Image: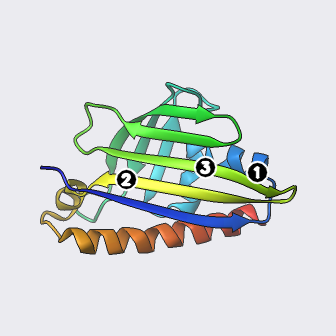
């Protein structure tokens, strides 16, 4: 049975929601705010429903280059984008990025990440308790969002 963790983080950014959405819905930008991302290639850019996204991620020293393929399964312009691994991928994951205007010059980003914890065993060569994977992923989420806020507010 697969164990899934589900982490959600939220930040407020002093930037208009359209600029923010355009940045976070372009997955090629992920390498600038999600540290483990080596590279992301989008087959249809700008992203839309059905776009194929290929992500090259650093999992560990043992696996410095792991490839996951995603499809865009939801796209609401200037509001929400969601990608999910293709059925052929070994480890399921999904991420959702929502942007909500607070006023004319600021917005709220909600980033949700769901993943099969089996990818940790694959990367490390051994399993970790689910609560440790959750804690570590939650810390990473906070670091990602802090980096994203810094980039967007430049």
Q: Is residue 36 left or right of residue 46?
A: left
The residue pinned by badge 3 equals: 98
Residue appearing at x 71%, y 40% in the figure: 78
Q: Is residue 46 above or below residue 96?
A: above
Q: How far is mark 2 from mark 3, CA to CA?
A: 15 Å
Q: Is residue 34 left or right of residue 98?
A: left
First reached walking from the N terminus: tag 1 or tag 2: 1
Mark number for residue 114? 2
Evaluate if marks 3 and 1 touch, with contact meaning CB atoms under 8 Å apart.
Answer: no
Residue 90 position by quadrant: top left
First reached walking from the N terminus: tag 2 or tag 3: 3
Residue appearing at x 55%, y 53% in the figure: 30
Classify the position of the C terminus by image quarter.
bottom right
Circle 2 packing at 10 Å, graded few (<14), some (14-19), many (20+), is some
Q: Residue furthest right?
A: 104
Q: How far is mark 3 from mark 1, CA to CA?
A: 10 Å
Task: Label 1: state its secondary structure.
Answer: helix
First reached walking from the N terminus: tag 3 or tag 1: 1
Q: Is residue 48 above or below residue 17?
A: above
Circle 1 packing at 10 Å, graded few (<14), some (14-19), many (20+), is many
Residue appearing at x 61%, y 30% in the figure: 45
Residue appearing at x 40%, y 39% in the figure: 84
The residue pinned by badge 1 equals: 17
């Amino acid at each position: 049975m697969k164990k899934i963790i589900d982490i959600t983080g939220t930040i407020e950014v002093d930037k208009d929601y359209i600029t923010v959405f355009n940045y976070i819905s372009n997955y090629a930008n992920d390498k600038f705010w999600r540290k483990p991302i080596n590279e992301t290639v989008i087959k249809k850019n700008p992203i839309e429903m059905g776009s194929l996204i290929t992500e090259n991620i650093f999992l560990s020293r043992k696996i410095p280059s792991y490839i996951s393929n995603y499809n865009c399964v939801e796209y609401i312009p200037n509001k929400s984008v969601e990608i999910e691994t293709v059925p052929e991928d070994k480890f399921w994951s999904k991420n959702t990025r929502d942007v909500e205007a607070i006023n004319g010059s600021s917005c709220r980003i909600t980033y949700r990440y769901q993943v099969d914890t089996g990818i940790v065993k694959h990367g490390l060569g051994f399993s970790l308790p689910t609560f440790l994977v959750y804690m570590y992923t939650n810390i990473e989420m906070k670091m990602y969002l802090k980096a994203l806020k810094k980039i967007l507010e430049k």
